[in-house]
Image (cartoon, rainbow, N blue to C red):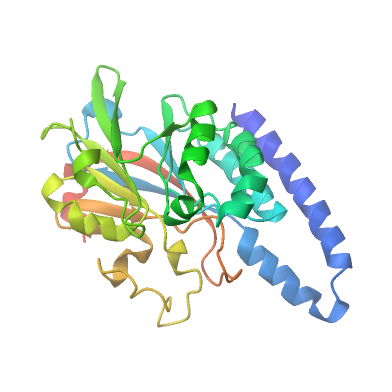
């Protein structure tokens, strides 16, 4: 499997380079260096590997690999090519679980155009337990019913204010998927319906501010997207959009502790509106699930 994943990645990278070379021919000579830097900022995916602290994690799940993709925003052919490389990188991690945390397209027009192709690429995902997906705000502005039907067809479980129990080696965790907060469709009470107080929960919530409504639920961990990691990170001051979250300025990217649990915010793959990234590469998150007590002394 690792050899097949590497071969697939080499093929995709060769195709990308060929297409980039053809595109550069059409770019005026004087601006080609800037074009190259711009494309590299958009397309050079970083695989972020880290231990993910999870409260009440069962022993059977300790060390289990999970990967996250978020904010794909497949609106152009080059976005689809980036997704192909991201899926190949995920498969090389050999995850047990894959989580997709929303914003697959930016609007209904690109959703209708690219949905079959996106489903084709996402069908390559090969976790040995399961893959789950939740909606983002752009999916609700498009049509998540169509998106979720296509995801379900290829074996990815859509969760929209719902939960699903996953068993492994005689123990279980509960994957909780919460609908988008921005579009006012988040229903944590509905999502946690049937979840027991003693359950270990891995919560998927597109908007990090959803965490403000989860404290009393004592989640095991929360995985988010939405912010694109700030997209543009300036020296010293960081991202200009880091203050948009009610949750706090630190939660727009990466791993942060909130109260008694951790929140991880993925930087996303795509862009929206302004096609720029600076000091903020697109991300594939690769987690090794870790019992919370093992890292509690070093928590922020």
Q: Is residue 268 above or below residue 176?
A: below
- Can the viewer see residue 148? yes
Please name whichever residue, 102 or 61, is drawn nearer the observer in this view of the structure. 102
Screen quadrant of the N terminus = top right
298 vs 67: above or below: below
Q: Residue at x 21, y 61 (%)?
A: 300
> Residue 213 location in percent, x, y?
19, 55
User: Which residue shows up at 38% across the image and 62% down it?
Assistant: 253
In this picture, residue 79 sits left or right of residue 258: right
Relative to the observer, which residue lies in front, 103 or 52?
103
Where residue 282 appears, as percent x and y from the top left, is 54, 58
Q: Position of residue 10 (x, y in %)?
A: 72, 41
Query: In this image, 246 relative to 39: left or right?
Result: left
- The answer to which quarter of the image holds residue 106 is bottom right
Residue 41 lies, with reference to residue 204, above or below; the image says: below
Residue at 15% across / 52% down in the picture?
A: 215
Left or right of residue 229, residue 111 in this image: right
| Numbered circles on residues, count | 0
Closer to the camera in the image, 57 or 183: 183
Q: In which image quadrant can residue 40 be found? A: bottom right
């Amino acid at each position: 499997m690792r050899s097949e994943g590497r071969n697939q990645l080499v093929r995709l990278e060769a195709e990308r380079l060929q297409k980039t070379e053809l595109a550069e021919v059409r770019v005026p000579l004087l601006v080609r260096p800037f074009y190259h830097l711009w494309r590299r900022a958009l397309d050079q995916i970083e695989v972020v590997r880290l231990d993910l602290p999870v409260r009440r994690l069962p022993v059977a799940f300790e060390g289990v690999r999970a990967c996250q993709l978020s904010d794909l925003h497949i609106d152009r052919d080059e976005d689809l090519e980036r997704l192909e490389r991201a899926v190949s990188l995920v498969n090389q991690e050999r995850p047990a679980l894959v989580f997709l945390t929303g914003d697959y397209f930016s609007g209904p027009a690109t959703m209708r155009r690219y949905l079959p192709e996106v489903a084709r690429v996402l069908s390559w995902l090969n976790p040995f337990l399961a893959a789950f997906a939740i909606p983002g705000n752009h999916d609700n502005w498009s049509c998540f019913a169509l998106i979720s039907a296509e995801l379900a067809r290829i074996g990815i479980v859509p969760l929209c204010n719902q939960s699903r129990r996953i068993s492994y080696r005689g123990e279980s965790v509960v994957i909780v998927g919460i609908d988008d907060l921005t579009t006012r469709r988040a229903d944590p009470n509905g999502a946690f319906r049937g979840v027991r107080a003693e359950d270990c929960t891995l919560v998927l919530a597109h908007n990090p501010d959803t965490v403000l409504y989860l404290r009393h639920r004592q989640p095991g961990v929360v995985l988010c997207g939405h912010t694109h990691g700030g997209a543009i990170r300036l020296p010293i001051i960081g991202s200009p959009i880091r203050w948009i979250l009610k949750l706090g300025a630190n939660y727009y990217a990466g791993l942060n502790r909130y109260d008694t649990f951790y929140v991880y915010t993925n930087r996303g793959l795509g862009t929206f509106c302004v096609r720029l990234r600076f000091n903020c590469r697109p991300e594939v998150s690769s987690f090794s699930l870790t019992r919370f007590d093992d890292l509690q002394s070093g928590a922020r």
